[in-house]
Amino acid sequence: MFNGPIPGQSLTTEPRAMPYERPPEIADPIEALDLHIENMSRPEAMEDALFFLEMGVDMVSLVEGILRSAVMEGIHSLDVSLIIAPVLHEYIKSYAVRADIDFDEGFDNPEQDKAIQYERDTMRAKKLLAQLREEEGMEPEEPPMMMEEPEEAQEEMMEEMPEEAEAPKGLMARM
């Protein structure tokens, strides 16, 4: 409970005391990616990554954890992490697929998936209904048209509108 930093403590420490406060060791994204792939190609590192995927950690969180660790150690910057994240994601994903591990990629948005699934189901249902109507020799259903206002309602609206608007007055009125 009392192990957290004291408010303002960061203002009393030496500047650039932490590795992430100094310039990164690697500035080139390709070199950083090579380093991460080399690290992940070690059997124990990939075994750990696959273990976490198996235990329910999603792929996005795993990759972000690996890259944030490298940023905190001062290996590369956060910008480089954003550049190489998709490649490292696919690299680890290929191993997980080969190992036949059921994992969550971490990209799913359940609300969006439900809406997409609903639209797909609706389209399939319409297609199936059209096929059934065609097989039974019925006329295809026409899409519903927008309700048009009766002519009387349109005429009433025209009568209610003033014919001439009052001339503008004041400083901004045109002359």
Image (cartoon, grey):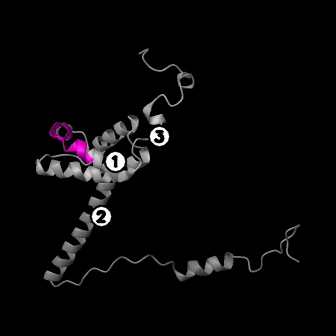
Magenta region includes residue 42: yes
Please provide the residue range marked out in magenta. 37-49
> Where is mark 3, residue-wise?
23
For label 2, the crowd category at 10 Å Cα-Cα, with few meaning under 14, some 14 to 19 and many 20 or more, is few
In the depicted structure, whether residue 175 falls above or below residue 15:
below
Residue 156 position, x and y percent, is 62, 78
Q: Which residue is drawn at 85% across and 68% down?
A: 172
Going by the image, does 165 lie left or right of 107? right
Disc number at residue 119? 2
> In front of the other: label 2 or label 3?
3
In the depicted structure, whether residue 87 falls above or below residue 61:
below
Observer-nearest of 16 and 133: 16
Q: Residue at x 19, y 73 (%)?
A: 128
Q: Earlier in the sequence, mark 2 or mark 3?
A: 3
Residue 153 position, x and y percent, is 57, 77
In the depicted structure, whether residue 68 falls above or below residue 169:
above
For label 1, the crowd category at 10 Å Cα-Cα, with few meaning under 14, some 14 to 19 and many 20 or more, is many
Name which quarter of the figure residue 25 lies in: top left
Disc number at residue 32? 1
Q: What secondary structure is found at the residue carrying circle 1?
A: helix
Q: Earlier in the sequence, mark 1 or mark 2?
A: 1
Q: What secondary structure is found at the residue carrying circle 3?
A: loop
The amino acid marked with disc number 1 is: Ala
Going by the image, does 133 lie left or right of 76? left
Q: What secondary structure is found at the residue carrying circle 2?
A: helix
For label 3, the crowd category at 10 Å Cα-Cα, with few meaning under 14, some 14 to 19 and many 20 or more, is few
The amino acid marked with disc number 3 is: Pro
